[in-house]
Image (tube, rainbow, N blue to C red):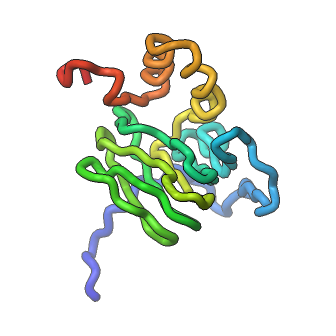
Amino acid sequence: MSYPEHLDYPQPRYLGRHGEVNAAFRPADSPPDLSGPGGDTHYLATHESTGGEFGLYQVELGPKAAGAKVHFHRAMSESFYVLSGELELYDGQKWVTGRTGDFLYVPVGGLHGFKNVTDEPMSMLMLFSPGAPREEYFERVAEMSRRGADELKEFRIRHDSYFVEDFDDPDER
């Protein structure tokens, strides 16, 4: 395989000479940061811990867990990597079955959704780039959905989540 002479790496952001001691380790047996009736979420790398570079979450959905209906983001991409089990993923055109090792990348503005339609639990990694403070969204979305459609829509938009069901007119999106 040949490589171009000039590789397009980003400009250096660390200009020190010897490196720093600044890594963050999270043991595999760390308890979930959020538990609910649909499953558990582990905050592996948050907006805060990565300086906004990315957000990485391990999400464990229980059997028949609703997940997220079709939506898009204006400011970030979202990626899904199935660790175990099966997950229905909407790829912008159709629902596809993701199985262990399958990956879906959704660019900024891409329609997507996910749900567990099986009788078995599943686990996945969700990656947001650049990172956004998604923790409040994960922690409060169930509460906001009980408050009514208008409050839920406002909450979703504040968290860069534009759900197709919130817009009667496609031009509003």
Write the residue at 57% across / 35% down. Answer: 134
Quadrant holding the N terminus: bottom left
Query: Where does residue 156 sit, x and y in percent of width and height?
Result: 47, 24
The spot of residue 103 in percent (x, y) is 42, 64
In this image, 111 relative to 55: left or right? left
- Residue 66 in the figure: left or right of residue 170: right
Q: Quadrant of residue 21?
A: bottom right
Of residue 85 and residue 129, the one placed in the foreground of this image is 85
Give coordinates of residue 138: x percent, y percent.
60, 34
The C terminus: image quadrant: top left
**Which residue appears at 55% of the width and 49% of the height?**
64
Q: How many discs mark residues in the rendered view?
A: 0
Q: Residue at x 35, y 45 (%)?
A: 112
Residue at image point 49% right, 26% down = 159
Q: Is residue 97 above or below residue 113?
A: below
Give above or below for 107 relative to 27: above
Question: Which residue extends farthest front?
Answer: 119
56, above or below 156, in the image: below
Determine which quarter of the picture holds residue 119.
Answer: bottom right
* Residue 143 shows in this picture: yes
State left or right for residue 16 relative to residue 171. right
| Residue 42 sits above or below residue 154 on the image | below
> Residue 104: x, y in percent?
39, 59
Would residue 59 be visible to someone looking at this image? no
